[in-house]
């Protein structure tokens, strides 16, 4: 016989179980009426947040499979199904459209149960601004559809900078910024030492400059034989015309290229096409997918992608499903090669479908196939070996973060390890412009796609409470954001009290908050050395601060997010100050109203860009004329001698 206390404790649990079963049956019944067309399905939680995005050739059959016998499901799928409260769908005309839409929705909503790629800004590319009259080479962190040519991805920013320096020196390509290029009236030092042909002052024709750039482009495409042949032909032609300085320059370029080619790894590939080979390795701690990038038979580099929630050894997980999802997301923002080589057979239908998706994105034919030949198999084996080699490093790093979050949970008496931490920093400059930053860490690492900046709109002067209230009110008005497991405030007891009062007014006191502040700085008056200040962590209702050892992962996570929030706020502040200074100078130009000022700033984002522009370029803007353009340049150039507004840029 159970006691009344036992009855009361079991009743809520049984009620929740009944509700869950009822919801499950209602969803299963509703799915029976779903269409059989291709489309996207969106699974939502009780808070109406998207927790999974999937694609389907037949929506009804695909979604219905989630509500079938759970013994066929993986542990991850069973957890997902328990959290589904609603399923919406979006119909598409074709399965290819469903693939394209799936990748963009995963990127936008970051669903909890999808395989999600981290932000790829850390992987560098070489960009040639091909649409420019005199193009140049840049390091780019994102591939954009802007008319430029992109090459990569490369292993590191240092490798890209080194390659750009080599190409600029070898082919004498300009390395100055666009604003400097437009303002030059005589050749710079780079030309005088023989490393630039000075297109800024027309010492080289557009045709000859483009020919040099073609050499750099061919080199980046791996066409080294073509590059050397072309340079030799130009060298002999210049020598025949007795242009010996040009011939000597081309000879030196040939020798430089031969020297660097000897250092590059060459694969005995049967194809001269650009290839990406994919491999993976994992266990119950996670899975690492590795991509090896081969261009014209030369290995350009490898990239690792670690998914801690994915178990490659789980018999209930179909590797074809998560591998295809990875490829769909990966090639939304990255360069698509001629061939994608896979370590397993995903089936003819799925291969053809992926090819159609990649062709839609790239505008050309792409081959996606299981590597069966000896030479192609060696590439996927290389990718899998790299994945195995890198796996432990990523697992150890992930485990360190997990232990750090567990220590934060214990030290701060949190109900659970803080998967999502948000930090806010209020920044005011001389009491005039107040801004705030929101920085987010997920699983102990920055989630930059969730960073937000706030320009304080309702507060005049310095008022931390009012500013914090506005920021938190605006943040928690967004139901589509996940709630934080911990809020970090930059400041001691005073700032912590402000944050707590704001959360109380917002009815969100269930969210834990911690304040970070340094202890008083101690100075040795004899040596004048300043001792390292100690970080203190303040909790509501506790008099003494919590202390973390400085060498622990928990300390690095909390201090790291505070420092990142401060950096993010200061960067925004500087940007606003520069814009305000520029606008104030433009206010002095007679005949330049608000609309024209906005149009001018839209075309020229900085004061240096406007100063460096010609009157004709400004006059080309709709609503402008040459007289107004000259008036603007006169005002900026006169004012620039007295107070350069872009001094901090």
Image (cartoon, grey):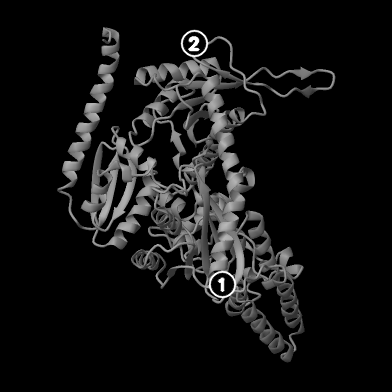
Q: Residue at x 23, y 22 (%)?
A: 15
Quadrant for the N terminus, please: top left
| Left or right of 640 on screen, residue 89 | left
Tag 1 or tag 2, which sits nearer the N-term? 1
451 relative position to 566: left or right:
left
Which residue appears at 56% of the width and 50% of the height?
122
Answer with left or right where residue 201 lies relative to residue 3: right
Disc 2 and disc 1: Cα gap in Å? 66 Å
The x, y position of residue 318, in whole percent, is: 39, 53
Q: Residue at x 32, y 37 (%)?
A: 49
Callout 2 environment at 10 Å: few (<14), some (14 to 19), or many (20+)?
A: few
Residue that mark 2 sits on? 541
Q: Which residue has dot 1 on it?
A: 375
Q: Position of residue 224 (x, y in %)?
A: 64, 76
Is residue 601 at all visible to an observer of this figure?
yes
Q: Residue furthest right?
A: 526
Secondary element under disc 2, as helix, strand or loop, is loop
List the single residue furthest toward the left: 33
Q: The C terminus appears in which quarter of the rendering?
A: top right
Say which element carries label 1. Answer: helix
Which is in the foreground here, disc 2 or disc 1?
1
Of 314 and 401, nearer the camera is 314
Find out whether the residues at labels 2 and 1 contact each other: C-beta distance under 8 Å: no
The circle drawn on residue 325 is none
Q: Does 122 appear above or below 495?
A: below
Residue 611 seen by the camera: no
């Amino acid at each position: 016989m159970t006691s009344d206390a036992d009855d009361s404790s079991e009743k809520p649990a049984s009620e929740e179980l009944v509700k869950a079963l009822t919801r499950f049956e209602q969803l299963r019944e509703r799915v029976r009426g779903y269409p059989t067309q291709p489309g996207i399905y969106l699974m939502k939680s009780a808070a109406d947040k998207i927790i999974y995005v999937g694609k389907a050739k037949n929506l009804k059959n695909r979604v219905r499979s989630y509500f079938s016998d759970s013994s066929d499901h993986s542990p991850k799928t069973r957890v997902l199904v328990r959290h589904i409260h609603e399923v919406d769908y979006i119909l598409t005309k074709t399965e290819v459209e469903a693939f394209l839409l799936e990748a963009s929705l995963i990127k936008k909503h970051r669903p909890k149960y999808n395989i999600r790629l981290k932000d790829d800004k850390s992987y560098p590319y070489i960009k040639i601004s091909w649409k420019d009259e005199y193009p140049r080479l840049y390091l780019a962190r994102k591939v954009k559809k802007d008319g430029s040519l992109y090459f990569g991805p490369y292993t590191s920013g240092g490798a890209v900078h080194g390659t750009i320096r080599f190409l600029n020196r070898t082919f004498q390509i300009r390395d100055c910024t666009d604003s400097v290029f437009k303002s030059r009236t005589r050749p710079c030092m780079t030309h005088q030492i023989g490393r630039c042909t000075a297109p800024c002052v027309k010492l080289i024709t557009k045709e000859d400059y483009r020919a040099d750039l073609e050499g750099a482009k061919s080199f980046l495409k791996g066409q080294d034989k073509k590059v050397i042949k072309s340079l030799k032909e130009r060298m002999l032609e210049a020598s025949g015309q007795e242009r010996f300085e040009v011939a000597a320059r081309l000879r030196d370029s040939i020798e430089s290229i031969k020297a660097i080619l000897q250092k590059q790894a060459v694969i005995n590939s049967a194809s001269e096409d650009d290839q990406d080979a994919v491999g993976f390795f994992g266990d119950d701690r996670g899975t690492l997918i590795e991509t090896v990038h081969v261009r014209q038979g030369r290995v350009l580099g490898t990239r690792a992608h670690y998914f801690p929630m994915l178990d490659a050894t789980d018999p209930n997980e179909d590797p074809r499903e998560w591998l295809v999802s990875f490829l769909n997301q990966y090639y939304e923002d990255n360069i698509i090669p001629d061939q994608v080589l896979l370590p397993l057979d995903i089936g003819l239908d799925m291969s053809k479908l992926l090819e159609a998706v990649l062709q839609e994105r790239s505008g050309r034919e792409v081959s996606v196939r299981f590597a069966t030949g000896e030479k192609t198999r060696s590439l996927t084996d290389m990718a899998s070996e790299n994945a195995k080699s890198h796996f432990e490093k990523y697992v150890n790093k992930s485990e360190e973060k997990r232990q750090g979050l567990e220590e934060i949970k214990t030290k701060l008496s949190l109900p659970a390890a803080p998967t999502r931490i948000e930090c806010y920093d209020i920044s005011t400059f001389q009491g005039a412009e107040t801004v705030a930053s929101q920085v987010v860490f997920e699983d102990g690492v920055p989630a930059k796609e969730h960073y937000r900046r706030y320009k304080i709109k309702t507060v005049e002067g310095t008022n931390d409470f009012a500013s914090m209230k506005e920021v938190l009110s605006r943040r928690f008005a967004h139901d589509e954001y996940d709630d934080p497991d911990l809020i970090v405030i930059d400041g001691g007891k005073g700032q912590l009290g402000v944050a707590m009062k704001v959360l109380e007014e917002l009815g969100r006191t269930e969210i834990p908050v911690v304040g970070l502040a340094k202890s008083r700085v101690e100075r040795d008056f004899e040596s004048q050395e300043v001792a390292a200040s100690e970080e203190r962590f303040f909790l509501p209702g506790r008099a003494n601060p919590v202390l973390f050892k400085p060498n622990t992962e928990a300390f690095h996570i909390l201090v790291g997010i505070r420092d990142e929030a401060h950096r993010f706020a200061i960067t925004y502040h500087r940007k606003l100050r520069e814009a305000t200074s520029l606008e104030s100078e433009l206010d002095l130009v007679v005949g330049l109203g608000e609309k024209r000022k906005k149009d001018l700033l839209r075309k020229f984002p900085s004061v240096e860009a406007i100063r460096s522009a010609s009157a004709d370029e400004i006059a080309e803007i709709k609503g402008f004329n040459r007289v107004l353009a000259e008036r603007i340049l006169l005002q900026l150039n006169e004012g620039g001698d007295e107070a350069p507004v872009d001094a901090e840029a």
